[in-house]
Amino acid sequence: MTTQELARTLAGYDRSRLTLCSVGSHSALEVAYGARAQGLRNLIVTAKGRELTYTRYFAARETPVRRGCVDAAVELDSFEQILDEPIQRRLLAENVVFVPNRSFEVYLRQKFEYEEIERRMLVPFFGNRRLLKAEDRAEVEDDQYALLERARIRHPQRYDSAEKIDRLVMVKAPHARVTFERAFFLVSSPEEFDAVSRRLIARGVLTADGLASARIEEYALGPSVNFNFFYSPLLGELELSGTDTRRQTNLEGLRNLPPSALDAVRDVPMRLEEAGHIAATVLESMLEPAFSIGERFVTAARELYAPGVIGPFALQCVIAAGPPKELVCYDVSLRIPGSPGTRYTPYSAYRWGRDVSVGERIAMELVMARDTDRLADVLT
């Protein structure tokens, strides 16, 4: 969407009825909650078989008491239909501002190229729609690793060939049956890489083609912490919304096994499917290093993908042992993070005087932009 197209779209909107919208997965409830907290409307686009969360269990009701958070839902046969022109026209009629989440990208990328997604989404995005493609780990030139390198942020050393493996590494390859998920395994030598990959191909976890495109990275040792940031173009400031860590299958189960049971699961492939998140605070001595990499990332994104970061993003890091301790960024989320639990860490309250969830912070920024006639600074 060009600047001129955005201006034409906003000229047709009733700004008193702006509606935050997201696809019904990942963090849609967070978007709905945040909109209501700031007096905005919300609408969730859901798919058949997944609608009850939004149309029943968390639907907004006013009597006999006010409860729930989802104002309205549009049910599609599949998420890909959101690009159909009648659906886009309906969203435009609802004065929608779209908040992309990870599920939006994952489901639509199974069928469409990024350029087609950008072109056919006629509604304004909160944030920079061009950054969707930058989250891709392999298929675009200026991907998240290019952003990390430009920002001079340490990330795990990459190996361009299994023959060069000389330490413990994690291999990340497309899963054979669920292609938008990745299969992971740990090895420490070329010989071990060959043995484990052959075993996983035989079991249908990997394919030879997927293995050929695998990313091989140094395995950074340390606790994993997601630093969930929010960059405000209106204030010109970077905020730390909160910190969390992931709960993933079947990694959690493997971690909890006693040593006596390890032989029984030696051939069980590690799965890192998202199961949930838990709040995790960090030492105050780590806050300045975290803000430092966050600010450098904002600058790099502005240089590569103008206008750069708008709103939420996350740098997913391992805190490597020191001294001094160092942040190693192994993944990037260039949109609303998947953890609403960040509000239960104290950082937003330190800034705003109360807990502010990422969904409400998005709504706050949109309201400020509307009321100061700066919507074009936060929408694309």
Image (cartoon, rainbow, N blue to C red):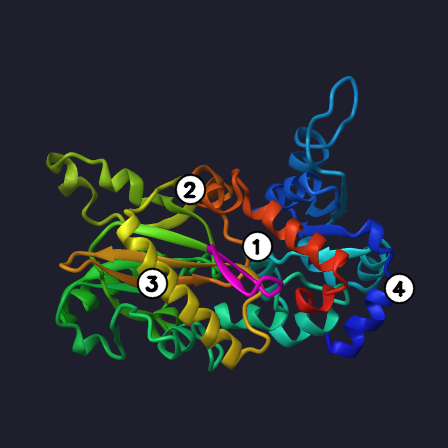
User: Up-down: is 102 above or below 60?
Assistant: below
Disc 2: CA contacts within 10 A as few (<14), some (14-19) or many (>=20): some
Q: Nearer the viewer, mark 1 or mark 2?
A: 2
| Of the pair 172 and 313, the residue shown nearer to us | 313
In magenta, the rendered stretch is: 229-239
Point out the tag, 1 or 3, that comes first from the N-terminus: 1
* Disc 2 element: strand
Q: Which residue position is annotated with label 4?
A: 12
Q: Are marks 1 and 2 in contact (CB under 8 Å)?
A: no
Point out the tag, 3 or 2, that comes first from the N-terminus: 2
* Quarter occupied by residue 50: top right
Q: Nearer the viewer, mark 4 or mark 2?
A: 4
Q: Amino acid at mark 3?
A: Tyr
Disc 3: CA contacts within 10 A as few (<14), some (14-19) or many (>=20): many
Q: Amino acid at mark 4?
A: Gly
Q: Which residue position is annotated with label 2?
A: 277
| Of the pair 220 and 106, the residue shown nearer to us | 220
For the N terminus, which image quadrant? bottom right
Q: Which residue position is annotated with label 1?
A: 103
| Of the pair 255 and 206, the residue shown nearer to us | 255
Side (left or right) of 242 relative to 57: left
Q: Nearer the viewer, mark 1 or mark 4?
A: 4
Find residue 177 and report its horizontal and vertical position in percent: 45, 57
Find residue 315 and report its horizontal and vertical position in percent: 40, 60
Point out the tag, 1 or 2, that comes first from the N-terminus: 1
